[in-house]
């Protein structure tokens, strides 16, 4: 009798899994043909490298009917890894956008890289989504890059789900992953499922909300699955107990559920709809993180993950309310730019308000006007043309020539001015600045400005012949437009083009793309560490620049001090004014536009220190006096500021700061002593040693980047290939005099 009752309940719950959570509207499309915001989910897939992001994405595309075959990373035929370098290496390098329908909803998904060298791709993508799915390797738990992408999602205030993947592995431990989530990410995991294994193989999951076993058919690539009751009474009681723990946790966070429990006087009589609503509400408030499980490669659990995306992650209309200042006018954000050989630049835009149509125009943060010639639906490197896309959706636009990643794009200048006014930005600022500057103000107000990470490596790049220099410059310009973390500058001292990147792999990929996509066999110089520099003590200097240009006398005099900043790293661009009475008397005569050019010149000069040309960090520039002659051109002011700072730094006492890396090593316990001995020779600082499972140890270390060039190879040798390592930047630290002297000799090629 118990079995029959459970079977009836299971059938009902399986057919209508989350009845109260789905949006109430039945129409997928608006009257103008665009998709209703309530029926859209914009999500990003985040994870450590090799956790299964691309494989999970492939299953979603296949089960939704968007593709007819299952792509595999090892075969190099996946939809989102379409670059030649991605297919050769089996990793995601560039984030890719795909769109598919699932249960009368549209899901726009961004598959992001898991390698630390391409963390900028993740940062760009998070500005275009409303929620994320974080994927864990069930045998590894929370890894180094997982912590990084989790912090990025925190900065963007994104609700998220966790999918514990690779639960088919023998070493997979779902409970250990929950502990990792709680301890390492300081979150409240809410497990909604329990794994079902038969003879060590994952065949399905127990869904706690419906108290049913969901088993996948292994014969048709996981397309079909069935929900069956839990016949074992002991197991059923255990599942019920887990459900009650789940409800008890939610009741402390959701008032409606707590009230229902009080009225029912028990957990048993609480309606499922109230539990589901509580999960959704708490997820949107980022109070909890629902946790699901499965194995994407073995085709288990992906459909339930897609259901949870619809039911627990927000629709676009539930976020970004600040864009209401635009009313019905179009406003969007450029989150990626790519270059197609036939179509030219392709700009990926997330629309927050209004509708974009083919042939329409918009203005950008650079002040230029752009025309959209064609619009495509996102499906990686495939292009299906559409006529328009509306608020909450993502579109690929051909036609814009000057847009760059991070640009806020709006319908027109009038719409921008109205939005600025509605946001109560000071009227004198709005009047004084041009529309492009006003747009930058708006981007700052909305928190849309992207922080570009510092380069940790740099190297020179040269074309095979002088005749290809222009082609190389154009190629670098296009790649830098796609990838803002790539730094390109011309070194006047050596006459070389210098690239700065996030790591060795980053720069290798740039070289490979230049060869395969632009047919330029460029030569990269030896990799150099991107050291920073800082002052040991304050240094003051004056500078007077006078010159006659085209019959007009140019004159600038300035007095400033550069001093160490005790507030911490990252303040190299901080410019302050002397607040003494004498200084204020002089500085008040300087117009805001002139001061802006002074700041621009000063900030530019701080990018190159006197020792190795590294960025000057941990310092503040205080301006004591600035006198500008009548008729002096703005660029002359900027050049004078740079010359003054250069002169001061020449006579200042500077020290080098070297980049550090956070290193996480997973190794069998017997290899721990030789690994620790090797790390001590590399000037490493041991942060933590913790057990993982019964036989492995997790070692967390801070080590100088300069000591880690060959480390992965050495680690494989020490551990007989059994240990793994992952790294990510961890700031800069001051070098002692001996290490600094050695670093300078290496940089100059003397050792």
Image (cartoon, grey):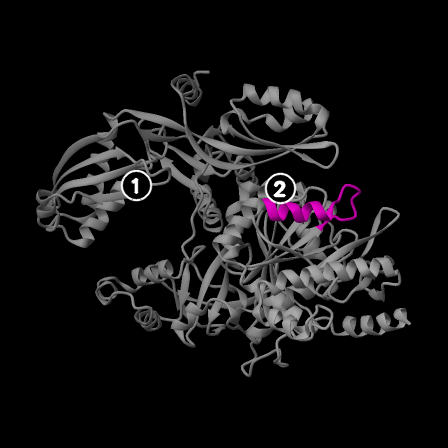
Which quadrant of the figure has residue 540?
Answer: top left
Q: Is residue 551 visible?
A: no
The residue shown at (89%, 63%) is 231
Residue segment shown in magenta: 165-183
Residue holding disc 2 = 143
Out of 85 and 534, give the one closest to the viewer.
Answer: 534
Out of 260 and 551, give the one closest to the viewer.
Answer: 260
Of labels 1 and 2, earlier in sequence is 2
Is residue 178 within the magenta segment? Answer: yes
How many labels, in total? 2
The residue shown at (43%, 33%) is 732
Q: Residue 2, how many percent across, how many down?
A: 88, 70
Residue holding disc 1 = 604
The residue shown at (15%, 45%) is 579
Q: Residue 174, how many percent across, how many down?
A: 72, 48
Q: Residues within 10 Å of mark 1 (few under 14, many from 20)?
A: some
Out of 530 and 204, give the one closest to the viewer.
Answer: 204
Asked if residue 618 is positioned above or below residue 517 in the image, the reply reads: above
Is residue 130 within the magenta segment? Answer: no
- Element carrying mark 2: loop
Asked if residue 537 is positioned above or below residue 102 in the image, the reply reads: above
Which quadrant of the figure has residue 260?
Answer: bottom right
Q: Residue 553, how many percent across, how many down?
A: 9, 44
Out of 117 and 701, give the one closest to the viewer.
Answer: 701
Q: Residue 636, how many percent across, how many down?
A: 18, 44
Separation of disc 1 and disc 2 at Cα?
37 Å
Q: Which mark is on residue 415?
A: none
Q: Residues within 10 Å of mark 2 (few under 14, many from 20)?
A: many
């Amino acid at each position: 009798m118990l079995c029959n009752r459970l079977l009836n309940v299971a059938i009902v719950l399986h057919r209508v899994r989350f009845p109260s959570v789905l949006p109430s509207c039945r129409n997928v499309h608006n009257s103008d043909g665009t998709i209703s915001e309530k029926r859209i989910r914009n999500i990003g897939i985040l994870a450590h490298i090799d956790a299964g992001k691309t494989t999970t994405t492939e299953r979603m595309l296949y089960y939704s009917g968007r593709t007819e075959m299952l792509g595999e990373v090892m075969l190099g035929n996946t939809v989102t890894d379409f670059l030649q370098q991605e297919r050769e290496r089996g990793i995601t390098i560039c984030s890719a956008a795909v769109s598919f329908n699932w249960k009368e909803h549209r899901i726009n998904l961004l598959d992001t890289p898991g390698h630390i060298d391409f963390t900028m791709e993740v940062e760009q993508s998070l500005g275009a989504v409303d929620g994320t799915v974080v994927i864990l390797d069930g045998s590894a738990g929370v890894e180094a890059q997982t912590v990084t992408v989790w912090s990025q999602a925190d900065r963007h205030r994104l609700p998220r789900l966790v999918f514990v993947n690779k639960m088919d592995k023998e070493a997979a431990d779902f409970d250990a992953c929950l502990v990792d989530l709680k301890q390492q990410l300081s979150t409240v995991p809410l497990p909604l499922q329990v794994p079902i294994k038969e003879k060590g193989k994952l065949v399905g999951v127990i869904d706690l909300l419906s108290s049913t076993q969901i088993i996948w058919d292994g014969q048709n690539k996981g397309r079909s699955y069935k929900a069956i009751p839990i016949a074992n009474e002991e197991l059923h009681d255990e599942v019920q107990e887990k459900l009650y723990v789940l409800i008890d946790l939610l009741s402390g966070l959701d008032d409606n559920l707590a009230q229902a429990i009080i009225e029912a006087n028990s957990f048993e009589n609480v309606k499922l709809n109230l539990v589901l609503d509580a999960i959704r509400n708490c997820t949107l408030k980022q109070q909890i993180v629902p946790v699901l499980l499965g194995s994407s490669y073995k085709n288990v659990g992906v459909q339930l993950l897609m259901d949870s995306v619809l039911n627990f992650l927000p629709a676009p209309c539930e976020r970004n309310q600040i864009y209401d200042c635009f009313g019905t006018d179009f406003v969007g954000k450029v989150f990626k730019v790519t270059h197609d050989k036939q179509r030219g630049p392709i700009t990926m835009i997330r629309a927050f308000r209004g509708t974009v149509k083919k042939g329409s125009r918009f203005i950008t943060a650079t002040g230029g006007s752009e025309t959209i010639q064609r619009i495509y639906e996102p499906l990686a490197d495939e292009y299906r043309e559409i006529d328009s896309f509306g608020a909450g959706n993502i579109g690929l636009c051909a036609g814009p020539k000057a847009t760059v990643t991070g640009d806020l794009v709006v319908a027109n200048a009038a719409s921008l001015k109205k939005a600025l006014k509605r946001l109560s930005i000071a009227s004198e600022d709005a009047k004084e600045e041009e529309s492009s500057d006003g747009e930058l103000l708006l981007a700052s107000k909305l928190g849309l400005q992207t922080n570009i990470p510092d380069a940790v490596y740099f190297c020179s790049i040269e074309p095979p012949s002088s005749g290809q220099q222009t082609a190389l410059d154009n190629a670098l310009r296009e790649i830098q437009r796609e990838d803002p973390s790539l730094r390109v500058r011309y070194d006047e001292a050596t006459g070389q083009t210098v690239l700065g990147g996030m790591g060795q792999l980053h720069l290798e990929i740039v070289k490979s793309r230049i060869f395969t996509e632009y047919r330029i066999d460029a030569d990269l110089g030896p990799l150099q560490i991107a050291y920073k520099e800082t002052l040991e003590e304050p240094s003051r200097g004056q500078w007077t620049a006078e010159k006659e240009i085209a019959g007009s006398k140019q004159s600038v005099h300035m007095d400033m001090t550069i001093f160490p900043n005790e507030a911490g790293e990252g303040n190299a661009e901080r410019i302050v004014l002397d607040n003494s009475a004498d200084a204020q008397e002089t500085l008040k005569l300087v117009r805001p536009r002139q001061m802006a050019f002074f700041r621009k010149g000063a900030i530019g000069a701080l990018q190159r220190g006197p020792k190795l040309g590294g960025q000057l960090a941990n310092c503040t520039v205080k301006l004591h006096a600035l006198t500008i002659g009548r008729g002096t051109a703005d660029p002359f002011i900027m050049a004078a500021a740079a010359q003054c700072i250069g002169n001061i730094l020449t006579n200042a006492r500077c020290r080098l700061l070297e980049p550090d890396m956070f290193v996480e090593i997973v190794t069998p316990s017997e290899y721990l002593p030789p690994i620790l001995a090797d790390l001590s020779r590399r000037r490493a600082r041991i942060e933590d040693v913790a057990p993982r499972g019964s036989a492995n140890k997790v070692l967390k270390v801070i080590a100088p980047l300069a000591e880690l060039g060959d480390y992965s190879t050495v680690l494989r040798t020490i551990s007989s290939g059994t240990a793994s390592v992952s790294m990510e930047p961890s700031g800069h630290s001051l070098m002692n005099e001996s290490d600094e002297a050695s670093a300078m000799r290496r940089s100059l090629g003397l050792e």
